Image: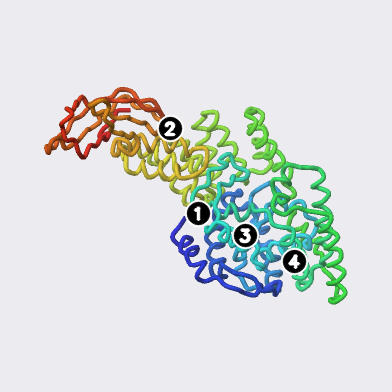
Amino acid sequence: MTTHLALAFIVLLTLGGCATNPVTGKSELALVSRQSEIAIGTEQYLPAQQSQGGLYQVDAELTAYVQQVGDRLAAVSDTELPYEFVVLNNSTPNAWALPGGKIAINRGLLVTLDSEAELAAVLGHEIVHAAARHGAKSMERNILLQGVALVTAISTSDSEYSNYIMGAAMLGSQLISQRYGRQAELESDYYGMKYMARAGYDPAAAISLQEKFVELSKEHETSWISGLFASHPPSAQRVATNIESNRTIKSTQPKAWETGESRFFKKLAYLSSKSDAYAAYDQATTLASKKETTVALKRVDRAIALEPNEPRFYGLKADMQHSNKAYRGALKSYNSALSRDDNYYQYYLGRGLTHSKLGNGGKARADLERSNQLLPTSVATNELGTLSLQEGDRDSAKKYFAAVARGEGPLSESAADNYIRLDIADNPSNYIQAQPADRNGTLVATITNTTRIPIQSAVVQFTAVINGQWAEKNSYVGTVQANSRIGISSGWRFRSDDVVESVTARVISIQL
């Protein structure tokens, strides 16, 4: 957790108290201050974007358009926040909001909408999640229940590097993937429709949007279930409630409601024209996950032919080439991806791993460090540990492996073993315990290997004060298997009238 975020959590309990929710007008407990919400959202926005595919940059005008629609709604919301709206390069239909008004919508959701008013319904809904403090309330519940802000490992959607996010960035992943409660969803629907009406959009678009989602939920499409429906479950109740809300709103605000269909389709024209390219890319992604690489490469080459400006296509091709150990080809493809988008962690991560395979240690380190700046992952950190070890920098290697070992991802156990292999030479007694005992007048010790790593030999140092004289002796022990124990004798035998005090036994060196 970064210093800024850690300090924010430290002051939560001291700044908290009762406050009026700016959207609902209700009095409620507020452990997370508005200032802290904004700081958390700002800090988590970049890593959250990175973990969900990065920015969609092929059509910059589309993002500008989404920002304009978002700004129009934010201007009539009940809370002044530093709102931002981005389009993510992700085929999964989804949208999310971080505390403080940082909002994103995936291109996979954009292409399912039918009007600007439906886009406004999505963005208005997310604005309310931020303005009504739904994400902050989730953090507050965890603070009350556990005394800390809950941080758990979350998969990086649409990436082969799933379950590898590290550090403070895990909080953003948790916040954007949390499942909102029924009350929060109904609240966001209702006030989002009010914001739509204030901005001049037809609030009935929220009805058609929910009706569409309910129908799609019946089809059990994986992309929807793993995307929007995971955090924003649709229901017939929400449709019925939106119908009533639409009737109420229009009865008090009669006007010529705007849907903006023609403007929306004009702005979506370029992305829509590339639907075959993204379909081929999605097919290639699925095939690659099933290890059907030959067919997957053909599909991704088809995607590139249809849309040569899309960096994700080159990135996927590079990942497959790397998996096939075609490292030279992978390097070329990663370079093609980065020439089109030099601000996405996965391209740097993949290229760094490829440089490492090719023996280009310096270039590998630069890419892996840049990858971690954009999104800290255990994959990059673990490889940096390996590179440091190859360079003879044991201290740096230990720091990298220790950081990975503290996580919960698939690399944590192997990183812990790598750390122990380095640290055990410096601190053998931390891992190989020696318990002295008197056995029929002979000083012995039980040696316990607490690690998953077998040791080949060890030196055990016995010390004691015998009849007022300090004594010290080293004994050697052979193989001690992982998580096992053996006995060893010091060779000292004591007479019945000997006075033996201050007996110790400790491992002073080991050989793996």
Residue 108 visible here: no
- Which quadrant does the C terminus fall into? top left
Q: Amino acid at mark 4?
A: Gly
Residue closer to the observer: 431 or 23: 431
Mark 4 and mark 2: Cα distance apart in space? 53 Å
| Residue at point 69%, 72% (across, down) | 23
| Residue at point 39%, 35% (across, down) | 418
Residue closer to the observer: 377 or 286: 377
On the image, the x and y values in percent for residue 144 come to 57, 61
Considering the numbered disc 4 on the image, is that residue within a helix, a strand or a loop? Answer: helix
Disc sitting over residue 168 in the figure: 1
Work out whether mark 1 precedes mark 3 in sequence or the reverse, and give the earlier one.
3
Q: Amino acid at mark 3?
A: Ser
Considering the numbered disc 1 on the image, is that residue within a helix, a strand or a loop? Answer: loop
Circle 4 sits on which residue?
A: 192
Please say if the residues under marks 1 and 3 sit with CB atoms less than 8 Å apart.
no
Disc sitting over residue 358 in the figure: 2
Horizontal arrangement in the rendering, residue 434 relative to residue 363 (left or right): left
Circle 3 sits on which residue?
A: 138
Residue 187 occupies which quadrant of the picture?
A: bottom right
Considering the numbered disc 2 on the image, is that residue within a helix, a strand or a loop? Answer: loop
On the image, the x and y values in percent for residue 292 come to 65, 28
Work out whether mark 4 precedes mark 2 in sequence or the reverse, and give the earlier one.
4
Say above or below: 415 vs 242. above
Say above or below: 60 vs 425. below
| Residue at point 69%, 53% (across, down) | 231
Q: Nearer the viewer, mark 2 or mark 3?
A: 3
